[in-house]
Amino acid sequence: MRVFIGILLTGLLLSPLQPARAIPFFDQLPGFEVQVQGDRKLQERLRAEMEKQRKSGSVLKSYKDPRDVARYERGTLEKLLRARGYYDARVRQTVSGGEILYRVNPGPQYRIKSITFDMPDYLRSDLGALPLSAGDPLVASKVLDGVKAIEKHLAENTCLLDIDVSYRATVIHSEAAARLEYRVAPSPEVNVGEVTMEGIVSVEPDFLREKLEIGSGDCFNREKIDAARLRLLRTNLIAGVNTRISEPYGGLVDITFLLKERRHRTVKLGVGYTSDQGAGVSAGWEHRNVFHRGEKIDIESKINPVQQSLKGELRVPRFFSDKQDFSAKAEYSNEERDSYLAESLTVGAAVQRRLSRNRTASVGSELKFSQVEEEGEPSENYRLLSFPLGLKWDTTDNLLDARRGATVALEVRPYVDLANTDTTFVKNTLVMTGYKTAGDWRYEPTLAVRVKAGAISGIANLDIPADERFYAGGGGSVRGYAYQALGPRRLIEEPDGSTRLSDPIGGRALSEISIEGRFRFSDTWGGVLFVDGGNAYADPSPNFSDLYWGAGFGVRYITSFAPLRFDIAFPLDRREDLDDHFQVYVSLGQAF
């Protein structure tokens, strides 16, 4: 049964996802089919466009009668055909048994007979080739691409105060053709005069002025103004940016940025629940403008039955460089795990540097004072000094609900115990994730994959502090098993001479893999199917062939900030007297 469930769920996640049948709770529109005479590719494109219209359109939801839906969608099909150059197309619809059939006779596809320009000759010089030419089909998207190409050329090579590009297509029905004309509205060329800012209350003006990258005498360019507005918003100190541009005078215009500062303080409260750790709460306070240049202090406390922590962090952006950030932290933590008790105080600092748009490197140092007591062993004190080195590559589109892109994060962390220099080891961790969404398919399915591997080298397993070893199991690891329930155990001798296995003691290696199929049934509701595998090992060699597997499903309530997740997972390799029949997880954000 365990193997059957695992194969079934894995097959559902990895098999090609075809457009699904309607789910009554989420889909109430009648099914439809599109038939195009003699053009299979056009038929497939029209059907795909109709699917998009059904997902994004709100008008159709008000129709109850399939015939009303058919009349509305016939008009949509006619518009789509004209947008592809089929101006003589005829569409007939029939409704039978609640299903709609659209029969399309596209007729000839109109082509561009000539392309002309209504703009001064000096603006047209060096324009280059457009993405369409005479003889091409009159496709609306290509015509608009031509508008964008002209706008880009003017923005990069002129100082026009206003760039207004339009087009006119004159259709010639007798020839199944059209004349296309691009027009540029007259506008003066100007340079930048004075650049000022209004609305600043507590942020240092010079700090924000550095973000503008626009100065007096520069060629006027609205794209540069938009980029400056975006940089101001990205400081996380500004809630809104508008601009006021003066009337031209002497070939100049003044630019005023109208700013609205954000509230710089935030109070955060959170709750969560997992059946292996119980209910937990968190509270925090954040100040994003401590020294008036975007420095941030973040204080956060988390409490649940197995861990209590208090953490404070100072982050200084643009530390000696626009590409560098500095962070310093202090954290107190008390852990009451099944296999150990640990109380620790950690202080550290790090510098993060952006190597490119998607790559970040970090280097730092950290000192951790801890007292750790393992099951059946006396407590030990440690003073661990470490020098974490990190490298991350990230192309994802959303931190808490990624739908596209990938991440690769590598950390190498050498340790030395200042109280006992024989305790020296190196902890290596590699995490990779990938996300692929079929946005054109029903329910916009996303395939999400996570792989994690870790290894510790230098000393024997039991010489490593228990709270620094690798463990597997739990909501962020292998769902279906209790938190840190997987991994090596040791034999403990009882006072009466009997022996028993201890709770997991952690290991020098870790292997984890997770596969999720995520679906969006509406703007606010989604679902997930998942399979997780993982284990921890006493030997410092990750092994992806000896894993414990769990599988399950979940519901997502999608908020404007992040999805709220509810997952229920089942252990496929359930161990008698060790594992429960299922685990429940409730938290904010996707599992990974």
Image (cartoon, rainbow, N blue to C red):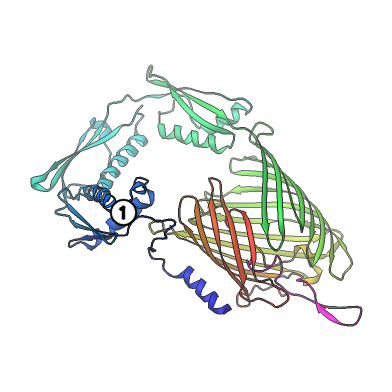
Q: Position of residue 200 (x, y in %)?
A: 58, 25
Can residue 148 be seen?
A: yes
Q: Is residue 118 above or below residue 536?
A: above
Q: Looking at the magenta stretch, what is its main secondary structure? A: loop
User: Is residue 322 shown left or right of residue 109?
Assistant: right
How many tags in the picture? 1
User: Is residue 435 shown left or right of residue 478?
Assistant: left
Q: Position of residue 542 (x, y in %)?
A: 65, 72
Q: Residue at x 61, y 56 (%)?
A: 391
Q: Which three-letter amino acid code belongs to the residue tagged 1?
A: Met
Q: Is residue 449 above or below residue 118?
A: below
Question: Dot 1: within a 10 Å radius of its alpha carbon, few (fewer than 14), some, or many (20 or more) residues?
Answer: some
Q: Residue at x 69, y 67 (%)?
A: 482
Q: Position of residue 55 (x, y in %)?
A: 38, 52
Q: Secondary structure at mark 1?
A: helix
Q: Residue at x 33, y 35 (%)?
A: 154
Which quadrant of the rendered structure holds the C terminus?
Answer: bottom right
Which quadrant of the rendered structure holds the N terminus?
Answer: bottom right
Which residue is most to the bottom? 497
Which residue is most to the left? 174
Magenta-highlighted residues: 478-504
Q: Which residue is mark 1?
A: 50
Q: Residue at x 64, y 39 (%)?
A: 320
Q: Is residue 494 magenta?
A: yes
Residue nearest the viewer, comparing 392 with 303: 303
Residue nearest the viewer, comparing 128 with 174: 174
Which residue is most to the top? 249
